Amino acid sequence: MQTAEITATYNPFLPFSSTFPDTRDRGRQWGSEGARWIAFATRRDVADVLALGLSVEQLATLGGWLSQNALLNPPALVPMKTGEFVCACGCGETFTATYRTKRPKYKDKAHKARAYRARRRDRELAAIEAQRPRAVALRRNGNGFKVVHG
Ligand SMILES: [Zn+2]
């Protein structure tokens, strides 16, 4: 019994009954932990859960199942992923990168700066284009036409 308590480590992804075998105090502790998980999942008071009259084992098992739910108990650290990506700056190069949550867009800082300069250049050219007078009509002018600007 003593060795089981020392070697057992807390693993939130295993049910309480398998991480901590049948020691009475441990069972009561994990029963109250299970009651708290049930209260958290159902948005009730812990006293309401205990008023149901479930046994310590039932509370611990149910709480263990709820603690395994990734929606209720999300993992603390999102695992790293590796993938092959095409650079979004327009160079068409592919690169391999590791990431945790957001997929990388550019190969490196130089490609990111290049994409920013291209966007800025496009913006400036669009502003110049918007300033230019636009042709709205053609008017007869002898044998040819005259362009009328708006
Ligand atoms: Zn690039």
Image: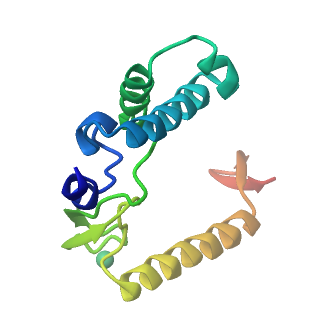
Spot occupied by residue 96 in the image (x, y as percentages of width and height): 18, 72
Please give the name of the residue rendered at 76% of the width and 53% of the height, measured from the top-left corner. Answer: 148
Quarter of the image holding residue 112? bottom left
- Residue 142 located left or right of residue 116: right
Question: In the image shown, does 90 or 140 lie closer to the viewer?
Answer: 90
Please give the name of the residue rendered at 46% of the width and 32% of the height, measured from the top-left corner. Answer: 31
- Residue 64 located left or right of residue 33: left
Q: Residue reaching furthest top? A: 52
In this rendering, the count of numbered labels is: 0
Rendering colour mode:
rainbow
Please give the name of the residue rendered at 25% of the width and 40% of the height, measured from the top-left corner. Answer: 21
Spot occupied by residue 54 in the image (x, y as percentages of width and height): 49, 14
Q: Is residue 26 above or below residue 69?
A: below
Spot occupied by residue 145 in the image (x, y as percentages of width and height): 65, 51
Q: Is residue 53 above or below residue 22?
A: above
Please give the name of the residue rendered at 27% of the width and 75% of the height, measured from the top-left corner. Answer: 91
One can see residue 36 in this view: yes
Question: In the image shown, does 138 or 9 lie closer to the viewer?
Answer: 9
One can see residue 71 in this view: no
Q: Is residue 50 above or below residue 120?
A: above
Question: In the image shown, does 17 or 44 lie closer to the viewer?
Answer: 17
Spot occupied by residue 136 in the image (x, y as percentages of width and height): 73, 47
Q: Residue reaching furthest bottom? A: 110
Quadrant for ligand 1 reads: bottom left
